[in-house]
C-alpha cells in the first residue's frame, strides 16, 4: 500500500467513525449505550437507567492524587467525574453522583475546555470517571481539545459493565483502560448491582479493552502510557468471589494487564438486607486474597497498604473545576 493510499484509507476510516459517533449521539433518543439497553429518549429530557438525560453533568474536574501510582504519581490525575451510572451498586462510595442527583450541566465545548485546563494545571493524564452514558459527547470533546493541543494520555475509568459497541467508539481515543472486575458470581452481581449478567458482560468488555491497548507500557517517569489495569474491590465476607476474579484475570491475560487489588471498601450507609456490607474488610480477609494472588503467580499488580477504608478518601463533589473561571 502506498503512503497516499494509507492516507486516503485513514481519512475514510475517520469519516466512517465520525458518522458512527454522530449516529450514536442521535441514538440517545432510544439509548443503548450501556448493557441496560433501557432505550430511554434521553434527547427529549427523559432519564435512562443511568439517571441522566443527554445533558452532560459533572460533579468535579480536578487533580486527583489517590489513583494507582502510575496514574496519579506526584502530578495528580486530571479526574473528570461524570454524574450518573449504568450499574449503580448499592455500596457505591460515590452514590450521590452515581444516581445523577448531583452535578452541574456543561456543554461539549465546555468539556473540551476542562480537558485543556487540567493539562494547564499539570495533570499527568485525563481521567474519565464513569463516562459510559456520555461516550459520544466525550469523543466530540476530545476531538475539540485535540485540535487545541490536548495531548495527554486518556484514561477511561469504568465499572467494567460496558458494551463492546460503545467501547469501539473509544478506540484511538483512550490510551489506558481502568475497569473494575467486581464479580465472578452472578448471584452477588444481582444482589448488589441488580446485574446478574455482570460477569459475562465485564469479561467481554475487558477483552475488548485489552485488544485495543495491548500490553501495558510505561514511560521513564513511571507513568503508564498505554494498557489496561483491572481493579478489584474486595467486599466483606466475599473473599471467595475475589479469588475467582483474580484467577480468571490471571489465567486469561497473564502479564498483559496489571491487577489492582483494593481493600478500601467503606460502608457509607447502613444496610438492612445486605448486612455483611455494614463493616470494612478485615486485615485477615485482605491477606487471604493477597496470599491467593501470590500463589497464582500474579506479579504485575498493585496493593493497598495502611488505612484506605475511610471517607476521607472519597472526593468532595463540590463542582471544583466544572464552571469556567472568568477573571
Image (cartoon, rainbow, N blue to C red):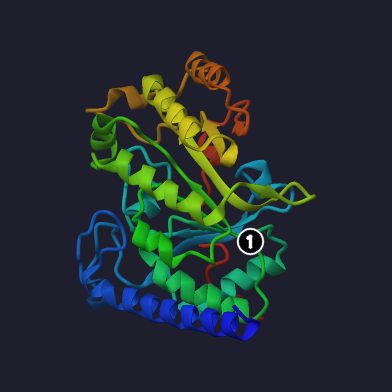
Q: Is residue 269 above or below residue 158?
A: above
- Residue at the extreme right of the image, as rendered: 220
Q: Visible in this render: residue 107?
A: no
Q: Is residue 160 above or below residue 131?
A: above
State the residue in front, 216 or 88: 216
Residue 132 placement, left or right of 48: right
Residue on which disc 1 sits: 153
Residue 185 placement, left or right of 94: left
Q: Secondary structure at mark 1?
A: loop
State the residue in front, 123 or 99: 123
The x and y percentages for residue 77 are 63, 54
User: Which residue is painted at 43% across and 76% down in the image?
Assistant: 17
User: Which residue is painted at 24% across and 54% down in the image?
Assistant: 36
The x and y percentages for residue 96 are 37, 51
State the residue in front, 180 or 264: 180
The x and y percentages for residue 70 are 67, 45
The x and y percentages for residue 321 are 57, 66
For the N terminus, the image quarter is bottom right
Circle 1 Cα neighbour tier, 10 Å, few/some/many (<14 / 14–19 / ≥20): many
User: Which residue is painted at 59% across and 69% down in the image?
Assistant: 115
User: Which residue is painted at 64% across and 66% down in the image?
Assistant: 118
Q: Quadrant of residue 134?
A: bottom left
How many badges with numbers are in the image?
1
For the C terminus, the image quarter is bottom right
Amino acid at each position: 500500500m502506498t503512503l497516499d493510499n494509507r492516507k486516503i484509507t485513514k481519512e475514510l476510516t475517520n469519516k466512517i467513525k465520525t458518522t458512527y459517533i454522530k449516529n450514536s449521539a442521535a441514538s440517545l433518543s432510544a439509548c443503548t449505550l450501556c448493557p441496560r439497553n433501557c432505550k430511554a429518549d434521553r434527547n427529549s429530557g427523559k432519564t435512562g437507567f443511568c439517571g441522566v438525560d443527554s445533558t452532560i453533568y459533572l460533579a468535579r474536574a480536578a487533580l486527583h492524587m489517590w489513583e494507582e501510582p502510575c496514574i496519579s504519581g506526584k502530578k495528580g490525575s486530571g479526574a473528570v467525574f461524570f454524574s450518573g451510572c449504568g450499574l449503580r451498586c448499592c455500596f457505591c462510595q460515590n452514590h450521590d453522583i452515581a444516581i445523577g442527583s448531583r452535578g452541574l450541566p456543561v456543554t461539549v465545548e465546555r468539556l473540551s475546555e476542562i480537558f485543556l485546563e487540567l493539562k494547564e494545571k499539570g495533570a499527568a493524564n485525563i481521567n474519565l470517571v464513569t463516562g459510559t452514558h456520555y461516550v459520544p459527547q466525550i469523543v466530540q470533546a476530545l476531538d475539540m481539545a485535540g485540535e487545541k493541543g490536548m495531548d495527554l494520555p486518556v484514561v477511561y475509568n469504568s465499572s467494567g459493565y460496558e458494551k463492546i459497541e460503545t467501547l469501539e467508539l473509544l478506540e484511538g481515543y483512550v490510551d489506558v483502560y481502568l475497569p473494575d472486575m467486581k464479580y465472578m458470581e452472578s448471584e452477588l452481581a444481582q444482589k448488589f448491582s441488580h446485574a446478574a449478567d455482570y460477569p459475562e458482560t465485564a469479561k467481554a468488555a475487558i477483552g475488548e479493552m485489552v485488544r485495543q491497548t495491548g500490553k501495558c507500557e510505561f514511560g521513564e517517569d513511571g507513568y503508564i502510557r498505554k494498557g489496561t489495569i483491572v481493579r478489584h474491590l474486595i467486599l466483606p465476607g466475599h473473599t471467595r468471589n475475589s479469588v475467582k476474579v483474580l484467577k480468571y484475570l490471571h489465567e486469561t491475560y497473564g502479564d498483559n494487564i496489571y491487577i489492582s487489588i483494593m481493600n478500601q471498601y467503606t460502608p457509607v450507609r447502613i444496610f438492612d438486607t445486605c448486612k455483611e456490607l455494614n463493616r470494612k474488610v478485615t486485615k485477615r480477609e485482605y491477606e487471604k486474597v493477597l496470599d491467593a494472588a501470590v500463589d497464582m503467580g500474579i506479579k504485575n499488580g498493585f496493593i493497598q497498604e495502611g488505612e484506605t477504608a475511610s471517607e476521607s478518601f472519597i472526593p468532595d463533589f463540590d463542582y471544583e473545576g466544572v464552571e469556567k473561571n472568568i477573571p
